[in-house]
Image (spheres, grey):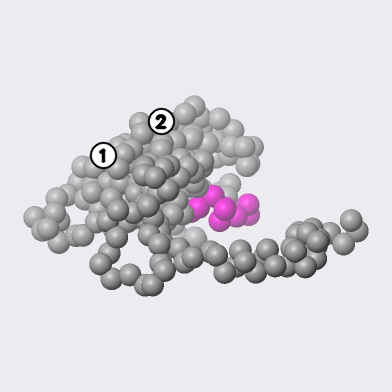
Amino acid sequence: MTEFGDRNPAFDTQLEPIRLNSPLELISVFIFLLREYFDSTRVQWVWRNNDTSSDITIEPTLNRHTEKANVKPAIYLEAGQKVYGKVSLGNRDQDQPEIQKKGLEHFYGVSQCDVEINCTSPRWGESSILADVVQHFIISSQYEICRVFSIRDFSPVIAGKTRPFELDEKMFSTPIQFRVEFETRWATMPIAPPLVKLIQQIRTDNGNVLVNMYLHTTGDSNV
């Protein structure tokens, strides 16, 4: 599998690292890379940007369509648990840009996200083999992925036992799980004005504004 992403002489110098802003962007990166890898003759399943002609489905789990899900092998990806860790007091970013908007506060943290992959197939053996291919691809390419997307760390990539798929008992699934740690930066405008507005409404309405706001949001008019 090392032929995927063979080193280009200009690879190290031409690509500036990209910072991921959310776990969903992280999942999108793996979807893109897996599609690129399976869009080749290296493996027996070829991904094509056409559901009819493609040998394999590679999608976020939320895009899984029941009517076509039990026809061909598939790789479904989703973000599991997400944790935003604290690395400094108040998560204040000490490396703020020189030019800042007035009142804009910059923050810095380390995000951890579990990546959950299900390699499914109507056949037990095919699901297991597909998971082995995906696991080896992630392990062999994680070094380049870390450099390009400023990822700090990968946990061990674990492939579980092949079992009936919990979303479709007609399919078998072999799960793959690992955790990725990456840097996160964000900025916020001062929250004082909306807080002052909320305090004024609470004092005017004796606190009922919060209850009424909740009931209006949930659509529960019988309480």
Q: Residue visible at 33% across and 70% down?
A: 100
Say which quarter of the image contains residue 43. Answer: top left
Q: CA distance from mark 1 to mark 2?
A: 14 Å
Report the number of numbered marks.
2
Does 19 sit left or right of 196 as displayed?
A: left
- Residue identifier under label 2: 158
Pointer 2: residues within 10 angstroms few (<14), some, or many (20+)? few
For numbered disc 2, what is the local secondary structure? strand
Quarter containing the N terminus: top left
Q: Amino acid at mark 2?
A: Ile
Does 50 sit left or right of 141 as displayed?
A: right
Picture coordinates of residue 130, whole percent (x, y): 41, 39
Picture coordinates of residue 101, whole percent (x, y): 37, 72
* Residue range (magenta): 59-67
Q: Residue visible at 52% across and 36% down?
A: 173
Pointer 1: residues within 10 angstroms few (<14), some, or many (20+)? some
- Of mark 1 and mark 2, the one earlier in the sequence is 1
